[in-house]
Amino acid sequence: MTPFLEGLLRLAWWLVLAPLLPGLINKVKAWVAGRRGPPVLQLYYDLARLWQKQVVMSTLASPGFLIGPAVAWVALAGAVCLVPLGPVGAMLSFHGDALLMLYLLALARFFTAWAALETGSAFEGMGAAREVSYAILAEAAMVAAMLSLSVQTGSVSLVTMLAPSAGPGAALLAAGLFTVLLAENCRVPFDDPNTHLELTMIHEVMVLDHSGPPLAVILHGAAMKLLLFSVLLTEAVLPMGELSPPAATGVLLAGVLGVTIGVGLVESLLARFAFRRVPLLLTTGVLFCLFALLVAWKGGRA
Amino acid sequence: MSAETPFALLANAASLPWSDVPEWPAADLVRATARELDRGARLCAWFGVPEHGAVRLVALLAFDADNTLAVGRSTPFTGSYPSLTVTHAQAQLFERELWEQHGVTPIGHPWLKPVRRTAAGAPANGEFFRVDGPEVHEVAVGPIHAGIIEPGHFRFQCAGEEVLHLEVALGYQHRGVETALAGGPHRATLSQMETVAGDTTVAHATAYATVLEALAGVEAPLRAQWLRAIALELERLANHTGDLGALANDVAFLPTSAACGKIRGDFLNLTALICGNRFGRGLVRPGGCRYDLEAERAAQLLQRLRVALRDTEQAAAWLWDAASVRSRFENVGTVFSAQATEIGLVGMAARACGLVRDVRYDHPAGWHRFAQVPVVVWPGGDVFARAKVRSLEIQRSGEFLCEQLAAPVEGEHSVESPPPAPDTLAVALVEGWRGEVCHVALTDAAGRFLRYKIIDPSFHNWTGMTLALRGTAISDFPICNKSFNLSYCGFDL
C-alpha cells in the first residue's frame, strides 16, 4: 500500500505543481513590463474552465485529432514518472530509463504533430513542419546531454545519472540544456507563447483547432514538460546526491524557481529570433552539450 | 516642365471651374497622362464622373518637384478605353475601381478583378493568382484574424517558408462612403468623413474641410489652421508610437511593446485635451475648428507632451539598442525605391524607400505654408527603415509641436463657410500619418456634390505591402504588415 501511495503522491507532485510554472513566468514578465499581470494560478483556472467546455470537432478530422493530445499527455506523464525528484528518487527506475524518457518525449511530439495534420489546415501543417524540423536539433542536444551524464556516471538510469553534479562540464551542460528547454517548451527566442499571429507560431499553431478538454490536456502537458526540463536541468547541474534530503529538496525547488525566473527574464529582454536563425542557436545548444560530453569523456583523464 | 503640360494646373487646397479642366477623348487622356507620368508626375487620383449614362474619366496628377497639381478629364464615353496600367503600374487599382464603379473596361489591364464589390454578402474576390509546382503550397489568412484588427483576406503562394507571391483581397469593410456623399454636403457628411479611417480622423476631416473651403472660396482663420496642424501631428505621434509598440510586440520584445501601448494613450489623451475626443472627432469643421485652445490648456498640453515625448524617446532607444530586434527588422520586407516609384507609394512607406514624398513639404497648404516639419527620409525600404522613419518622425513632429505651442497664433478659430460654388472642382491633399490623404470634390449646378472622391494612402500602399513580402519568410508577414499598418476601412470606403 505504501509504495502505491508514495507513487501517487509523486505523480500528484508533477501533475499539480506543473501549471504553476507558466504562471510564474508570466508574473516575471509582467513585473519587468511594469504591469500587474495575470494571477499566478491563471493556468489552473483556465484548465478548470476548459475542462467544462464542449469539444468542437472539425468535420474533416479523424479520431486521431482527439487521440493525439491524449497519447501526448500520457507519454509526458510517463516521462515525468521516470525523472527522479531529488532525495525521494523516481517513481519508476530501471536500467535504460533515460532512453525511454527521450523516446516518450519524441512520442508526445509525434502525436501532437499528427493531430495538427489531421485538421488539414495550412497553418497547422506549417506549425507541424517547423516543430519537427527544429526537433531534429533539439533532440540531438538532448541525446548529447544524456550521453555526457551517462559517460560521467557510467549508468543509463536517470536516478544514478542525475545524482552527482555534471562536474567540470556543468556550465556547458547548463547552457545547452537551458537552450533546449527554451526550444522544447516554445519560449522566446524560439517561439512566442503569447503571440496571436498564426503565421509566426510553432507549437501554438499546432493546437489552434483544439478545444475543451483536449486543449486542457495539451496545456497541462506543456506545463508538465516545462517542469520536467526544469527539474532535469537543475539535477543535471547540481550535486543533488551529495546533499542531505531536506537540503536537496530545497535546492531542487530553488533550482526550478531559478530556471522559471530565468525563462521569464529571457522573454522580457530578448526579441524573438527569425526562423532562419533558430537552427543557428539550436546548433550552439547542441555544441554546448557535445562539449559537455567531451569534458565528461576525456576531462577526468587529461 | 509642368508649365508645358496640357493639363490644367492648380495648387493644393484650391478649386477650379469644371469647364476650365481640359478634356480629351479617353484614349488621348490616357496617352497624355502616361506622358506626364513618364516625366515624373505621380498619379494621385483616377476616377470616373457619371454623366447622362456615360462616364467621364478624371486624372489628378501631382508634380511633386514643382509643388503643383494637374488635372485633366475625358469626354463622356461608355464601353472601354486603352488601359494605363499596361505602361504605368500605379494605375492598376484605380482602373480596377473605375471598372467596378462605372463599368468601363480598361483594355489590356493584366489583372482586372473586383476591388471591393460584394456578392452574396461577401466581397467578390474572383480568382487568385496561383503558383503551380509540387513544392508550392497556398496559405489563406483571414478575413477573420486572431487579433483585434479589421477584416481582410491574404492569399500566400509559398515554397516552404518563402513567400513567392501575396495577393490581398479587401472589401469586407465597404460601407458605400462615396455613394453616401453624392448629393451632399449632408448633415452627416462631416461625421462620415471623420470615420473614413478612424485612426486618420484629423487628416480626413481636414481634407474635407479644406475642400469645402476651397469650393466656397474662403480660407479658415490662421488660428484654426494652426490648431489643425497641431491635431494632425498629435495624430501622427499617437499612431507612430502605437506602431512602434506593435512592431516590438510582433517580435516579442516586451519593454518597448509595453511602454508604447501606454504612451500612445498619452498622446491620444492630448488630442482629447483639445477637443474632448481621443481621436480628434468634432475638432475640425469647414470654416475652422469647433474648439479653441486657450493659453492654460496649451501650456498644460505642452507640459504633458514633453513628458510623453521623453517616454517615447526612451522606449524607442530600448528598441534600437536591442540587437535581437535589429536582426529581425533589417533586410526584411524590402521594397526597392524603383518599385516604390513605379507603384506610386506614398507617405512614410515611400519615405522609408528613400523617396522624398511628403505633402506637407511638396504641396504645403494650411499652416504648413508657414511652419515646416523637416521631411524624414531613410533608405533601405525594409521593416527597419519603416520603423526608423516612424521613430524619427516622432522626434520631428514633437519638436514642431513644441515650437508651435510656444508661439500660438492669435485670432478667431472659426468663420462661417458659405455654400459651395456650383460646377467647380476642388482638391485637398493632407499628409496623414500613413501618407497622402486625397479628397477631390466636384459640384453640380446647384452646388451639391456630383462626385466626391476619397483616396486614403492605403489605396496606394497595399500593393507595396504585397511586394515587400516577395522572397520574405511567411513568418515575417506580421512585422511587414505592421510596418505598413495600412487601413482596411480607408481602402474599402
Image (cartoon, helix red, strand yellow):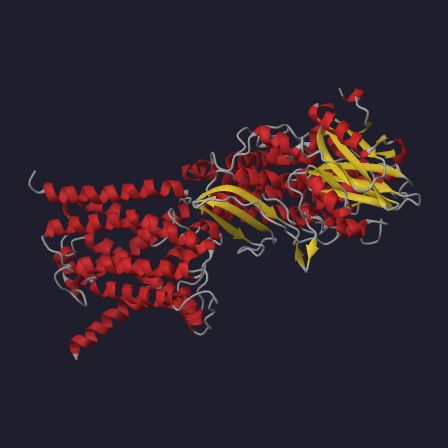
Above or below, B298 against A52 in this view is: above
Height in image: B106 above or below B261?
above
The quarter in which the C terminus of chain A is drawn is top left
Of residue A265 and residue B29, the one placed in the foreground of this image is: B29
Residue at left offset 60%, top offset 30%: B376
Kindly indicate the quadrant of the structure image that contains residue B401: top right
Q: How far across and how far down the image is residue B390, in percent? A: 57, 37
Report the quarter where the N terminus of chain A lies: bottom left
Number of marks drawn: 0
Which residue corresponds to the image point at 47% horizontal and 34% vertical from the top-left?
B331
- Residue drawn at (86%, 32%) of the image: B21
Q: Position of residue A74 (x, y in %)?
A: 29, 67
Measured from the top left, where is residue B120 in percent x and y? Answer: 68, 60
User: Residue at position x 57%, y 43% from top?
Assistant: B241
Q: Is residue B152 visible in this depiction of the protein?
A: yes
B70 with respect to B387 (left or right): right
- Compared across the picture, whether B238 is left or right of B53 comes to left
